[in-house]
Every structure is written in structure tokens, then in C-alpha cells.
């Protein structure tokens, strides 16, 4: 297990980790429900996401983990017939991300996302990373170059890409493309980064590189990651949430969830006895 | 072993149908291809004697040997220019609105069905509409502008459908990638959807134009002349204001009308002229299609998902 550097704590059980820092809430779902038309995909979820920690969402296919993730950047607003109920509070300003008066574009400017399949734009490597900055009105060539380099370094792609910034992004390998997408998401200095099964289309080596990257990134940014791979959740995350049929079954410190889950369903799932 | 022999003979029997269909399909294909090649060759042979520089630089004439297609090809080119300038922005903007902005409800469904149906409306009907609307109501007369607008209406559905299809071919995760970075709808359209669908849009536009250049019925309906011995006023001049749009209001003729005019003459010599003009017209169409293929190839090279 990678994450032994500091033992994080849930507020519920401070007694067992008295020496640990108190986690700061970055976001918190409050009684969150979500509907695709008449179908209720999320049921009254209450969950906190801690600042500069990695929180993993696990659960079987169709349990709603991706749906939950996509609430955080209001991706569901792109399609008709979707409906949210409840709130996601975002701190420190205590904004309700799902509020009617909150523009989804503002939300997406603060919270970036990396998708399941690497989805670079059919443009150059440079333009891919620069796009979020251009959207924000950054025009100065020098500032763009600086930010792009910084983002590519942050995504561990600089050494491989620095001599071919004007090459088309799809000339990169799958793993490099995914790191390019991470750089693209990082370039705008988001407060929170969403990962939707970021390694499911990658080979084990590329997966390892991305996992290490995620582990390093949490010093800078709050991370919420959906994964279908439990070992991955155990390796990269500080907190884990187990979801089933649209409900949050159990949430806690990753080590505790994997070693001694409190719920029988969670235990069955992580030990592979599920179903 | 007996079983294996049975299987082999069965495969043998089934494969005969493969051979039979291959022959049948080839025959069907040849009917189309050979007909076109024959027609094209015949036109080329009949018109060969007339295909020289003078043919392109002379006005029509009472004497077949002196008649040329100058006013016709200039007319066709200018009408096509108006058609493109009008149809492309109108068609692309409509398609973008329908695809990205319009709410999905029964209204947009009806509009969608209508657009598809418009593509099937006979061109003469557009001619009648244009005669009433552009020529008389708007007072544009029997001008290049009227003809260009008419043909623009005619190819508008083609442009809209091609644009929508090209935009729909862009995968969802590319759009989501743009939106996830905080792009607005317009930023997504202008930075991603339009550039990535440009090969498809161009192909649609050129295919529409290739159809429009050969249209005769609507142009005759709005009253294009069959005998034009002058060119429209030049769009550029040496004196201020240098640019002039007078040519838009000029009477004109186009290639298919010139051809039609010559075919209806009794003298055999004019048939050669018609064949030569037909050859030029088909060549123009093929050249446009060739351009479409080349552009699509060039632009698609850089677009993959």
C-alpha cells in the first residue's frame, strides 16, 4: 500500500488517530439525489470530500459512481431530462455547486475532469494543454507557453513532449494521451480534479505511471476518482466510498475500509464475494 | 471422413453463390459506369472540333463555328459564387443551431423532417417560388442575384444535412472534453465542432454546388436569357470605389441553358457546340467533386479520435 505517509482521519473517529491532522472539507454532498428522467440514479447521498486528499468511489457497474462524479462539474446539465436534488457544498466559499443560480461554466472553471477514455482534441499537444487557458481569455504567447510547460511537467509528460509540442496529440501513445488530458485539466489550476476511471483504457505500465501521478498530485489539488479496480483504490486513495445501486453504502479512511469494513456488503464486494 | 467430404461439397455448393453474385454485381456496376463513359466520350468526340481557346472566349453567335460559351461560363461562375456565399453561412448556422442550441421537442422534430423533405422538392418548384419572391416581390429581376439566391435555396437542405451529420460524427467525449474545461456552447462550436466537421461540411457544400451548376429548370423559370452577347459589369475597376456590385443585377445565362439553346437548333453544327459545352459542364462538375475528395482527404488527415 502506497499511502502510509500520514494516517488521515474521519471526523467520526478522532480517538484512534489523535496525532493526525484534521482533514479540511473541500466539498460535501448533502442529501444528493439524481434522476435520469424518471430513473433515480443516486439516492440521498451524504459524503464529504477532503481537501488535498484522494477520495475513491468504488462499486459494481451501474452503481452510480460515475453519475455521482459527474454531478461535481455539472456534466449532466449538457443533456436534457436530467435532474438534481439536494446540494453539493463547495468550500471555502460554501457555494452550492448544484444551485440554480450557479453557472455550470463557473463550476467547470473551478473543477476539472479527466475522462475514462483519453480524449485529446484533434489539435497539437500545445493547443490541447492551452485550450482551458484560451477559454479563460489568456492570449499572451509567453504566459501560455509558461503555463503549458508547467502543466506538462505536473503531468509528467514534459520530457516526452517538449520537442514535439506542435505534433498532433493523437500521435502520442494511449498512456501519454491520458497524461496530456491530465495536463490539460491541470493547466487552469483547478481546486478539484475529477477522474472517471482514468486507467481503464490503459495497459498496466501506463496505469502505474498515472497512479503515481495521482499520488503526487494530491499535494496540490483535491482529487475524486472513480475506479472499478479495487487495488487501485487501495493504492491511490486516502478515503474510499463504496456505492451500490445509487446509494452510498460505506465511506471511510481507505485503510479501514479495506481492512475492517463495518458493513457486510462492503466486505463482500472488496473480498470478491459480491453477488 | 465421409462427413468431411459432405462438408466440403456443401461449402463448394455455397461458394457458387459467391461467384454468381460477384458476376451479377459486376454487371450491374458496368451498366452504370459504361453508360456514363459512353455519354462522356460521345460528347468529347462530337465536341472535340469545337473545344479550343476561341470557344471559351467568344459570345454566342448565329454562326455555329463562331459561337462560344464566354457569357455562359462567366454566368455560371458568378451564379455559383452567389449561391455559395448565401448557402454556406445560412446552412451551417441553421445546422449548428438545430444540432447544438435548439431544444429537443416536437417543434424541432417537425423542422427536421421538413428540411429532409425540402431536399426532395423538384427544382422547378424552387424556380416558381423564386419567380414570385425574388424576381417580382423583391424586385431583383432576372438577375444573377435572383439565380444565385434560388440555387442557394435549392442546396440549403443539402448543406444543412451534411453539416449536421458531420457534427454528429464528432464523438460525445470530445464535446464533453471542451465543456469540462469551462467552454461555453459558442466556444465549443467555434473551436471544436466547426473545425472538426469542416471536411464533412465542405463535401456537402461542393456536392450541393455540383448539383446546382447543372440545374436548368429553376433558372429558366426565373427568366434567364438564352442569348447574351455581353458580360456583366466587372466587380473590380481601376477607379474609386474600385469594387462594384452592379454585376449582381445583370442579366445572364448559364452553361446548361446555353447547351439547351444549342440542342434545340436544327443545324447540325450547333449540335457539336452543345456537345462541347456539355463536355465542359461535366468537366466542371467532376472537377468540383475531385476538389471535394481532395479537400476531405487533406482535412481529415489531422482529425482522429
Image (spheres, coloured by chain):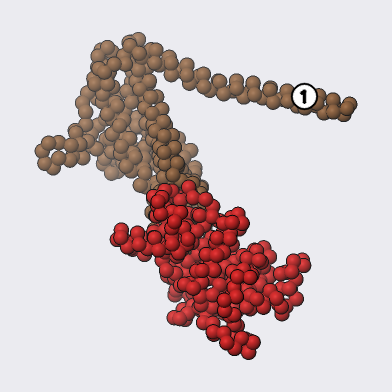
- Residue B18 makes an appearance in the image: yes
For the point 33% across and 43% down, the residue is: B86
Q: Which residue: 46% across, 58% down?
A: A157
Q: Quadrant of residue B148?
A: top left
> Residue B130, relative to residue A79: is it above or below?
above
Q: Is residue B233 left or right of residue A81?
A: left
Give the quadrant of the N terminus of chain B: top right
Residue that mark 1 sits on: B13
Q: Residues within 10 Å of mark 1 (few under 14, many from 20)?
A: few
Q: Can you see residue B264?
A: no
Where residue A255 sits: x, y (%)?
65, 76
Residue sitting at the far top: B268
**A11 horizontally vs B19: left or right:** left
Q: Position of residue B226 (x, y in %)?
A: 29, 24
Residue B153 placement (x, y as % from top left): 38, 41
Q: Residue at x 31, y 28 (%)?
A: B254
Using the image as rendered, state which of residue A185 and residue A255 is in the foreground.
A255
- Classify residue A7 by image quadrant: bottom right
Q: Between residues A88 and A236, which one lies in front from this camera angle? A: A236
Question: Please, is residue B281 above or below residue B218 in the view?
Answer: above
Measured as percent of width and height from the top left, residue B152 is found at 36, 40
- Circle count: 1
Q: Which chain is brown?
A: B
- Drawn colour of chain A? red
Q: Which element is circle 1 on?
A: helix
Amino acid at each position: 500500500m502506497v499511502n502510509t505517509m500520514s494516517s488521515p482521519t474521519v471526523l467520526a473517529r478522532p480517538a484512534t488517530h489523535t496525532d493526525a491532522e484534521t482533514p479540511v472539507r473541500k466539498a460535501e454532498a448533502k442529501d444528493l439525489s439524481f434522476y435520469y428522467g424518471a430513473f433515480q440514479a443516486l439516492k440521498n447521498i451524504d459524503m464529504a470530500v477532503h481537501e488535498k486528499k484522494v477520495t475513491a468511489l468504488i462499486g459494481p457497474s451501474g452503481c452510480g459512481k460515475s453519475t455521482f462524479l459527474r454531478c461535481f462539474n455539472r456534466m449532466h446539465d449538457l443533456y436534457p431530462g436530467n435532474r438534481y436534488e439536494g446540494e453539493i457544498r463547495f468550500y471555502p466559499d460554501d457555494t452550492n455547486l448544484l444551485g440554480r443560480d450557479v453557472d455550470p461554466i463557473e463550476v467547470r472553471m473551478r473543477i476539472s475532469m479527466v475522462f475514462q477514455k483519453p480524449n485529446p482534441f484533434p489539435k497539437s499537444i500545445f493547443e490541447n494543454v492551452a485550450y482551458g487557458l484560451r477559454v479563460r481569455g489568456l492570449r499572451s504567447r509567453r504566459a501560455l507557453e509558461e503555463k503549458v510547460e508547467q502543466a506538462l511537467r505536473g503531468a509528467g509528460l514534459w520530457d516526452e513532449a517538449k520537442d514535439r509540442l506542435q505534433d498532433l496529440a493523437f500521435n502520442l501513445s494511449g498512456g501519454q494521451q491520458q497524461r496530456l488530458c491530465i495536463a490539460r485539466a491541470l493547466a487552469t489550476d483547478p481546486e478539484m480534479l475529477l477522474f472517471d476511471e482514468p486507467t481503464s483504457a490503459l495497459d498496466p505500465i501506463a496505469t502505474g505511471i498515472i497512479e503515481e501521478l495521482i499520488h503526487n498530485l494530491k499535494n496540490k489539488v483535491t482529487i475524486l476518482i472513480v475506479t472499478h479496480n479495487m487495488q487501485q483504490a487501495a493504492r491511490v486513495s486516502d478515503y474510499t466510498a463504496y456505492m451500490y445501486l445509487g446509494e452510498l453504502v460505506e465511506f471511510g479512511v481507505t485503510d479501514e475500509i479495506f481492512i475492517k469494513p463495518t458493513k457486510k456488503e462492503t466486505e463482500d464486494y472488496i473480498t470478491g464475494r459480491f453477488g | 471422413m465421409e462427413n468431411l467430404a459432405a462438408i466440403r461439397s456443401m461449402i463448394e455448393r455455397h461458394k457458387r453463390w459467391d461467384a454468381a453474385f460477384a458476376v451479377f454485381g459486376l454487371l450491374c456496376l458496368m451498366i452504370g459506369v459504361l453508360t456514363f463513359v459512353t455519354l462522356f466520350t460521345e460528347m468529347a468526340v462530337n465536341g472535340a472540333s469545337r473545344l479550343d481557346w476561341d470557344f471559351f472566349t467568344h459570345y454566342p453567335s448565329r454562326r455555329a463555328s463562331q459561337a462560344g460559351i464566354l457569357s455562359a461560363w462567366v454566368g455560371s461562375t458568378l451564379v455559383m459564387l452567389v449561391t455559395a456565399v448565401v448557402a454556406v453561412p445560412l446552412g451551417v448556422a441553421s445546422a449548428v443551431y438545430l444540432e447544438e442550441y435548439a431544444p429537443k421537442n416536437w417543434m424541432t422534430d417537425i423542422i427536421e423532417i421538413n428540411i429532409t423533405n425540402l431536399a426532395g422538392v423538384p427544382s422547378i418548384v424552387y424556380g416558381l417560388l423564386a419567380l414570385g419572391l425574388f424576381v417580382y416581390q423583391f424586385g431583383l429581376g432576372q438577375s444573377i442575384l435572383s439565380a444565385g439566391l434560388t440555387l442557394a435555396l435549392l442546396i440549403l437542405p443539402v448543406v444543412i444535412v451534411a453539416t449536421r451529420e458531420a457534427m454528429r460524427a464528432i464523438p460525445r467525449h470530445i464535446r464533453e472534453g471542451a465543456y469540462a474545461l469551462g467552454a461555453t456552447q459558442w466556444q465549443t462550436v467555434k473551436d471544436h465542432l466547426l473545425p472538426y466537421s469542416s471536411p464533412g461540411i465542405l463535401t456537402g457544400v461542393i456536392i450541393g454546388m455540383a448539383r446546382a451548376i447543372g440545374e436548368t429548370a429553376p433558372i429558366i423559370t426565373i427568366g434567364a436569357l438564352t442569348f447574351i452577347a455581353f458580360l456583366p459589369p466587372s466587380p473590380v475597376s481601376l477607379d474609386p470605389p474600385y469594387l462594384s456590385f452592379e454585376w449582381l443585377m445583370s442579366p445572364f445565362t448559364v452553361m446548361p441553358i446555353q447547351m439547351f439553346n444549342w440542342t434545340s437548333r436544327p443545324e447540325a453544327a450547333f449540335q457539336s457546340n452543345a456537345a462541347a459545352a456539355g463536355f465542359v459542364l461535366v468537366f466542371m462538375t467532376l472537377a468540383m467533386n475531385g476538389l471535394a475528395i481532395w479537400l476531405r482527404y487533406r482535412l481529415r488527415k489531422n482529425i482522429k479520435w
